Image: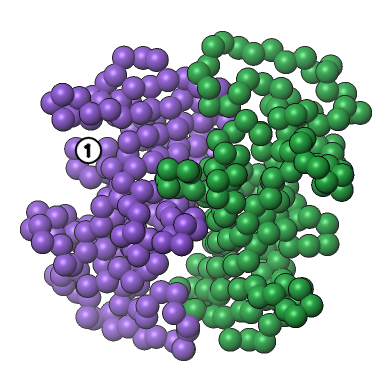
Chain colours: A green, B purple
Amino acid sequence: MGSPTATAPWKQLLLDALRSNSSLKHSSFFQLATVGSNGRPANRTVVFRGFQEGSDKIQIHTDSRSRKIEELKHNPLAEICWYFTDSWEQFRISGIVEMIDHSNPDSLKLQQREKAWHACSVKSRLQYLGPTPGLPYIGEHLTDENSLDSSTSPVDSFCLLIMDPDQVDYLNLKSNQRMTFTSTQSDSQEKCWALERINP
Amino acid sequence: MGSPTATAPWKQLLLDALRSNSSLKHSSFFQLATVGSNGRPANRTVVFRGFQEGSDKIQIHTDSRSRKIEELKHNPLAEICWYFTDSWEQFRISGIVEMIDHSNPDSLKLQQREKAWHACSVKSRLQYLGPTPGLPYIGEHLTDENSLDSSTSPVDSFCLLIMDPDQVDYLNLKSNQRMTFTSTQSDSQEKCWALERINP
């Protein structure tokens, strides 16, 4: 096992993978697994919305009315599986997910949510004005695009998810190498990462 | 909600997606989510090994020594997330996973395992002779390819997983349509599927 390091060593590997697969639109998609209150695993594709500034925390946008919100309220643990189809690399990223919705009492977090909302395209924002995801479809829903000019605050159904990773499993299917990265809290409360090569 | 039907209506959609994405090697890869004994979700990429003959059950091969086996012994529920990158279709397939390893007492099931083993390429089979997945790497492991001639029985670490789906969530991102398929047991113990269009 290598000596622990304060900067997340897997983050650079992930940024490299994103760059080498950037010609593929789907390279920013990954699968997020959560656990329902009935103990049933759930798994869906979501979009990577970047790292939170200056950190290794992963941002995702979602609809507050979607089932994953209920699941995360019950159990905030999640695992991302991110497979890069061009470079044949897989990242399994495990950690706790924080939800920042309109009712968040922390003004700094509400600012992060506002910033995330304004980073969205108008087309992405329009989704949050649609009918409740997962409910029976009762016909075409028309949303007024004009209600979303660039100055509008985030709508209530817009929720920012932030995953704080504590374990990463990296597999490279071309070189057949696999590594785990495990975070440990140092005395100064700073996250430290230990890496170990393991059998694929 | 449509009237229930005995043949799995999502299976044809999946076969169509497989065909229309068949030029992409990764179209047969999907992400399998399970739950660890600690309540933590786990998520990894696996390869689709076809349907079990004449059924809608999904076959996967794995190493008996991998962590997902422990997880499935503790909680056999799993959810597949299968995103087709060319046709923009997602299938979320939820169900119970059965494990068929060398110790299975049912001779019919052992035959299925044997058949699955012989359907594998030599390269795939060689993986099962390698060191235990996930343990610390202690150097290059040389496996004797000759020990695996085509008549050899499956090695002990080869495990056939069979998922019996009971719920499927289908999303088409091009048409923005979403449907759920839910299985119900009929009086004759036959699985019936009800489908419903829901909001994306």
Residue A154 position within the rendered picture, expressed as x and y whole percent measured from the top left: 81, 31
Please rate how many residues cluster around mark 1, counting C-alpha atoms within 10 Å: few if below 14, some from 14 to 19, many from 20: few
Rendered view: B58 above or below A196:
above
Look at the numbered disc 1 and give the secondary structure of its residue. Answer: loop
Q: Nearer the viewer, residue B87 or A125?
A: A125
Q: Judge by depth and name the residue closer to the eye, B22 or B140.
A: B140
Q: Which residue is mark 1?
A: B55
Q: Residue at x 75, y 80 (%)?
A: A187
Can residue A107 be seen at all in this image of the molecule?
A: yes
Residue under the point 46% across and 25% down: B179
What amino acid is found at the position of numbered circle 1 in the picture? Ser
Residue A90, by quadrant, is: bottom right
Residue A165 sits above or below residue B88 on the image = below
Which quadrant does the C terminus of chain A fall into?
bottom left
Quadrant assignment for the N terminus of chain A: bottom right
- Residue at 50%, 41% (x, y): give it: B84
Residue drawn at point x = 21 percent, y = 59 percent = B100
Is residue B148 shown above or below A66? below
Q: Is residue A123 visible?
A: no
Left or right: where A153 falls relative to B33: right
Q: How many marks?
A: 1
- Residue A12 % position (x, y): 72, 68
**Res B154 → quadrant:** bottom left
